[in-house]
Amino acid sequence: MRTFIAAAAAAALLTATAAPAGARDWRHHRHDDGVGSVVGGAILIGGIAAIASAITQGNRAKQDAAVEGCAAEAESRTGARVADIGHVGKSKGYYTVQGSLDGAEGGARRAFTCTIRNGSIYSFRTDADGA
């Protein structure tokens, strides 16, 4: 997938740099430039979309890794299972994951909050920690 995105971006850049060379002959082909402009524009827009998609996919992978890391930490520290993840936020490269834990042996659910960056846990607390 990344190879396809890189190829699309390279094609868009080549099209953008080739357009000024074709502009020199504008007097000779005044009526033929409409199709070329549309195709060039479409390729450029496609390249931009491919780059944006790659960035979005990279962010999604980091978010998923943060959720996995915090869920593993929650289960390891508490011995309870993660029931759900309610919120994931990002600020300055740190991901904050909020969720809830199933109560052990029929006990009440507990909330947890975990902050992680690059796979390292920076803080972890449950609502039982403050009580």
Image (cartoon, rainbow, N blue to C red):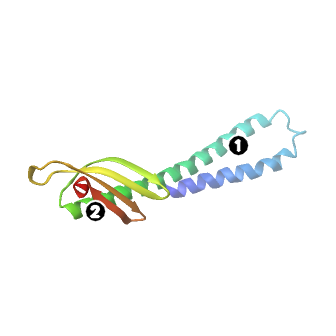
Left or right, 21 with reference to 68 = right
Residue at the image position 75 percent from the left and 52 percent from the top: 17
Q: Which of 28 and 96 lies nearest the eye of the viewer?
A: 96
Q: Which of 42 and 75 lies nearest the eye of the viewer?
A: 75
Q: In this view, does 128 lie above or below 86?
A: below
Residue identifier under label 1: 40
Left or right, 30 with reference to 6 = right
Residue type for callout 2: Glu
In terms of secondary structure, where does tag 1 sit? helix
Q: Which of 92 and 30 lies nearest the eye of the viewer?
A: 92
Residue type for callout 1: Gly
Left or right, 32 with reference to 74 = right
x then y, percent, for residue 105: 9, 53
Pick whichever of labels 2 and 1 is earlier in the sequence: 1
In terms of secondary structure, where does tag 2 sit? helix
Residue at the image position 50 percent from the left and 57 percent from the top: 92
Mark 1, other Cα within 10 Å: few <14 / some 14–19 / many ≥20: some
Residue identifier under label 2: 73
Q: Which residue lies furthest to the front in this view?
A: 131
Per the model, the C-alpha gap separating discs 2 and 1 is 50 Å
